[in-house]
Amino acid sequence: MRLRNVKGSRETIAANEFVIQDEESMKGKWHEKFGNNNPIHIEIGMGKGRFIMDMARLHPEINFVGIEKFSSVLVRAIEKQNEEKLPNLFFIRMEAEYIENVFDKEEVDYIYLNFSDPWPKDRHAKRRLTSVQFLSKYINILAKGAGITFKTDNRPLFDFSLEQIDEAGWVKENVTFDLHNSEYAEGNVMTEYEQRFSDMGNPICRVVFHP
């Protein structure tokens, strides 16, 4: 999908109070930033922010950090946060590959990967956020007992992800190939893409897993 450039988005992001500007300086200091010791959950590839903002509203007892690499998309979430000013939510504009530079060992209590870029060509497999390469990064920032939820409507990507989870030696808690018609549907918080794909009749795949 081609992303439309939003004029002034980078300037808006650079000046916004809810966007962390020097993210690497936050490593090991996230609880200080939030002003409490609540668990920290992150969404990598948060898009326009529907999911993470809904989660932040539903769970004021949890601190949330949304990560998005595209300025033109992140700026839409900023517009919403400017109105709501949720105290338990900050954003970062960055590439996921640098995640270990931003969060310290055991600093993150949960990771959400929602409708990640499938990178369909085989030569780009290492760039998929559920590849063993990325799993090896996540394990360095996740606290003991922490886990990951991954959702997608892309069945080839989901099958690949299940294989990568097994290859990395992680444990799958539950797997469904049709989330909205499964026992796990209750309490599910949707993303923008999830709503769109579900309305089109596409089954949503989901796996919950941990190291």
Image (tube, rainbow, N blue to C red):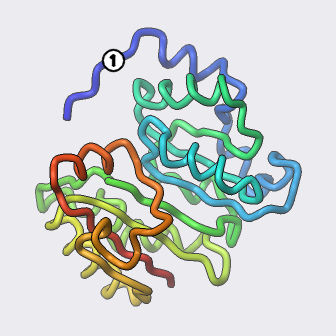
Taking the spot 48% from the left edge, 26% from the top edge, the residue there is 76
Q: Position of residue 23 (x, y in %)?
A: 65, 42
Q: Nearer the viewer, residue 149 or 121?
A: 149
**Front one among 161 and 194:** 194
Task: Choose between 117 and 101: the one closer to the eye.
Answer: 117
Is 157 located above or below residue 115 in the figure? below
- Can residue 170 be seen in this snapshot? no
Q: What residue type is labelled 1?
A: Asn
Image point 54% across, 75% down: which residue? 147
25 lies left or right of 153: right
Residue 172 in view in this figure: yes
The picture places residue 154, in percent across and down from the top left corner, at 19, 60
Q: How crowded is mark 1: few (under 14 residues within 10 Å), some or many (20 or more)?
A: few
**Image coords of residue 193 (percent x, y):** 31, 45
Q: Is residue 131 above or below residue 48?
A: below
Q: Quadrant of the N terminus?
A: top left
Residue denoted by label 1? 5
x 63%, y 52%: residue: 102
* In the depicted structure, whether residue 196 falls above or below residue 128: above
Seen from this angle, which residue lies furthest left? 121
Quarter residue 177 falls in: bottom left
Q: Is mark 1 on a helix, strand or loop?
A: loop
Up the image or down, 114 lies above or below 165; here it is: above
Q: In the image, is 87 to the left or to the right of 14? A: right
Nearest the viewer among 11 and 157 is 157
At a point 72% along the width and 31% down the height, the residue shown is 85
> Extreme top residue here?
7
Q: Position of residue 142 (x, y in %)?
A: 61, 72
